[in-house]
Image (cartoon, rainbow, N blue to C red):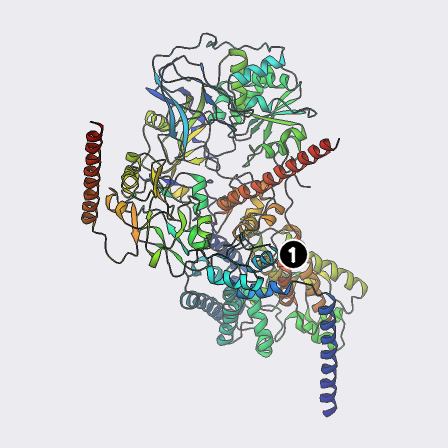
Amino acid sequence: MTQTFIWTVAILTVLGLLLALILFWVARKFKVEEDPRIDEVEKVMPGANCGGCGFAGCRAFADAAVKAPNLDNQYCPVGGDEVMQKVASILGFTVAAKAPQVAVVRCNGTCEARPRTNEYDGAKSCRVKAALYSGDTGCAFGCLGCGDCVAACQFGALSMDPATGLPVVDEDKCTACGACTKACPKHIIELRLKGPRGMREFVSCMNKDKGPAAKKACANACIGCGLCAKTCTHDAITVTDNVAYIDFNKCKLCRECEAVCPTGAIHGVNFPKELDKEAVKKRIADRKAKAAEAAKAAEEKKEVANG
Amino acid sequence: MGKVTFSMGGVHPHDSKFAHGCAIEELPLPQTVYVSMAQHLGAPAKPLVAPGDKVLVGQVIAEPGGFISAFVHSPVSGTVKAIAPRQDLAGNFMMHVEIAVEGDEWDPAIDRSQDLVTAIPDDKAAILDKIKAAGVVGLGGATFPTHVKLSPPPGKVAECLILNGTECEPFLTSDHRIMVERPKEIVVGAAIMQKVLGGCPCVIGIEENKPDAIASMSAAVAELGYPNIRVQVLKKRYPQGGEKQLIDAVMHRQVKSGGLPIDVGAVVQNVATSLAVYEAVQKNMPLISNVLTITGDNIPVERQHNYHYRIGIPLSYIVEQAGGIPDTAAKLISGGPMMGKAISNLDATTVKGSSSVLYLSEAATRRQLETACIRCGKCADACPMGLEPFLLKRLYKAGDLDGLEQNAAQDCIECGCCLYSCPAHIPLLDHIRQAKGQVMGVIRARAAAAKAAAEAAKAAAEAKK
Amino acid sequence: MDKKYIVSPNPHIHANVSTTSIMRDVIIALCPAIVVSVLAYGWSELLVLAVSVLSCVLLEWAVTKWMMKRPSTVGDLSAVVTGLLLAMNLPSAISPWIVFVGAFVAICVAKLPFGGIGQNVFNPAITGRVFLLVSFPAQMTNWNPTPGFIPLPDAISGATPLSALKEALKSGSTIPQFMETNGYDLASFLWDAGASAGEISAGALLLGFVYLLIRRVVKPWIPIAVLGTMAIISAIFSGINPEVYTGVQFNLLTGGAMLGALFMATDYVTSPMSTLGGVIYGIGIGVIAMMIRYFGSYPEGMSFAILLMNCTVPLLNMWFHQKKYGRA
């Protein structure tokens, strides 16, 4: 009995040592030489492997960063400036800070606002649906509601609201990796500046149809009337193909466009106070009156000077 | 000769040819027609008319927009009202010419008599020009310009002209009716194409479920006595009318992946195309009309029709003429139930390739709830291209483009057999179609890059000289 | 259009098959064998069948509902099929609680943890049976026939032909002697061979399988490969030494050969998708089963053979594909 024990222990020990030696030898023999900084950079990365940076994953990003002459062409949207600073310090580069962004859903075609005109019965995929036809509502530009963006989000930041049939972004979870913007066949989701304390203005519509057609398809549609563009004092709004767009780099969050929009297609979020449309409209009217007065005065002056 | 069929896959849906006994009726003209500029495969046609122009029936209103494109003719006489985008049956905007119908005045060059012209012109180039000028495109579904198909590239020789009279899609009967009612014209059309292709043999393939068409076509072939034309009876099996499947069935040859039928010496044309070729060459009649079936499940026979319609007539008008949409209809389809397109916009207009308006009931067409794949392999058994749809769907979901290409996602012919036969009701084709698109994109990009690289190398070599 | 019509990609019609309809066909195909076994073994066989099916269905329902929190898959009848196949692999005298343990292993170990129907690597019914065989060897090999509704003419008490044979060979007798003492002939194998429900009548199983073939539920290649391999191997070995190795007829018609080849090896989920893969899989089963029968310590090896070959299925699926059009 004792002998059996001894033999067993001895054989297993020898076997273990032998295998350990083989492992050691194999590890030495097949070792791949790599820049150790790749590992270091990878360590400070978020490790989500989401591909938001345009590389296959965090390691691919690190590999490219180590080989690149500078970090100008690389940015990790998930880790943001914090991670980029760390990466830069490891590699001895400097990077400029980038303002944080967030995914914004630019369609407000809720079930009530946008009546269904037919019933879609294919695979539950926006891509499939978009390839098939213009959609199950009168609007050929709006959200198809199959949730490709939700499936694409690796951070659980998107969910479909069953009441509206539209995706909702959880700002705290959104890392602005941009996966949803690529997944949406209608290009409804856009990465926009998160704004001070999350305050931002955007046009929640993509409908390029002419006003009456857009309005018929969806009560919340932008009809391309251009009131907002005329009102904007910061030159931030353009209307192309019957739909307005706010340039988030120029917008000063005055909310005047939101107040004048006849269909409520312009949305302002995270503002501390509710928008007092009348007050803003009065402000605009006062300003316009003043401007008109000033113009008149200038005209008169001119006339006086000329006369 | 016994009955033949293709070698792999395929399914046997109930043929439901309820309207096969309905003789072709002439559809009355509406007040307005909308002629689409994108009725064919390839580049859209460019309009040659302006609002306010008067046009005659058969007058050219648009010219080809590229090498693979086709002429478009006015199907009616009247005044051009507008040239504007209009939604097609899937709701996408396409350029249309709107014409208000005034009377029915024909272009005098067109021979409208019913006399059969059997003498075939000698000049091949002239025949091809006539076919091109008449805007003839393949009427079997793909609407590929016929004159392009009848001009094999240099070095390729047509060994067999296959006339596709299979009409393997359930419900459809338009090809069946023209084979019964106008067999001689079809045979003359086949003889014309045979001549253009250099006198290769011609096989007219007809499925066994159309005995009257087989009889009338055989009689016409015998009576007209052109050499080297015969009728081949095929077993009933979907998708026999697929170009690659038909070549396999008739010639026992397989077209290589990414290749063209002419690579194995085959040219396939639909019987309706053959009729259009006859009219174009012998009668100077451009392609301005076609035959369309109105049918469906649980539709009384008196509401089923085979209409000879002018291209450009809105679907809604045709539906109205046929007594409106039946209450039982839950889905409207343009084309057959296997490969047709669901109609989301009934105001859309008919195009050269329109072959049916099909009403399907809720019970027949509603998709069942998707359940887990049980790996039964029925989709792979059904695939006429020998693909493995279950695998392709999985690779697509995983985003594995290399895997998709290795497993030949690009060979999919979108026939629908996989989804048709899936017991778990998994929307296989919906996903594989996307996968195919992505793989084709990769292949095209690679070809373009290779071409650019070759040209750059050539330029560099020349610069060296 | 006021009415909202349906819009979807093609195809717009369906073959009208479903997982449920396929499972229903399998159940119908098992019926002849079930009827024979109930007639032969009476109420206790009925009890085993009932306990097995009910346990499988209840366990699947409970686990999908409360643990996996997803729509129940009981409606697809796959649990019923598993229950029936498990019961047909058990002796009729076995106590119900052991049947329940087998059902538990089949559903809660072999099937659902892998993700439920379509995802399991191993055939659930066989996993359940093998678990019972190694855990309760005494009960699982107690083949005392319970009283049936019709008398069995030449049932051997206490052993299946295969285990009786193993004992006989151990005690030194030869196969011709064994056959003679037990009075086996072809007819007795086709209609009753004194064994578990699924082994009792090869004829009834074949009848059911023909139904499956007609309904196009399964293709015959896997069973042909399994039985063909077993036949070839037994022909070679019995040709070399008929004293020690049993013949073709005995091997094909006894034990789980028929049930295994016709109903267990053809399980969609755990068999290869391609025809060639299926044939190789079938040959593997045949070889392993015959090796166990001839050289192993167990009298029967069908279950082990199928389980072992189940492991190779992902590999076979990776290596062997359908023949593609235009890519010869």
Could you tell me residue B21's position as x and y percent? Answer: 44, 25
| Residue B183 visible in image | no
Q: Residue at x 74, y 61 (%)?
A: C233
Is residue B379 or residue A61 the one in the foreground?
Answer: A61
Could you tell me residue A149's position as x and y percent? Answer: 43, 52
Could you tell me residue B451's position as x and y percent? Answer: 65, 35
Crowdedness near tag 1: few (<14), some (14–19) or many (≥20) residues, C-alpha within 10 Å: many
| Residue B243 visible in image | yes
Q: As drawn, which residue projects farthest toward the right? A: C240
Q: Residue at x 55, y 69 (%)?
A: C128
Q: Amino acid at mark 1?
A: Leu
Quadrant of the frame with the N terminus of chain A: bottom right
Up-down relation of residue C219 to residue A218 (above or below): below
Look at mark 1 in the image and give the residue it sits on.
Answer: C316
Chain letter for mark 1, please: C
Residue B1 occupies quadrant: top right
Element carrying mark 1: helix
Would residue B137 appear left or right of C4 to someone viewing this image? right
Up-down relation of residue B200 to residue C151 (above or below): above
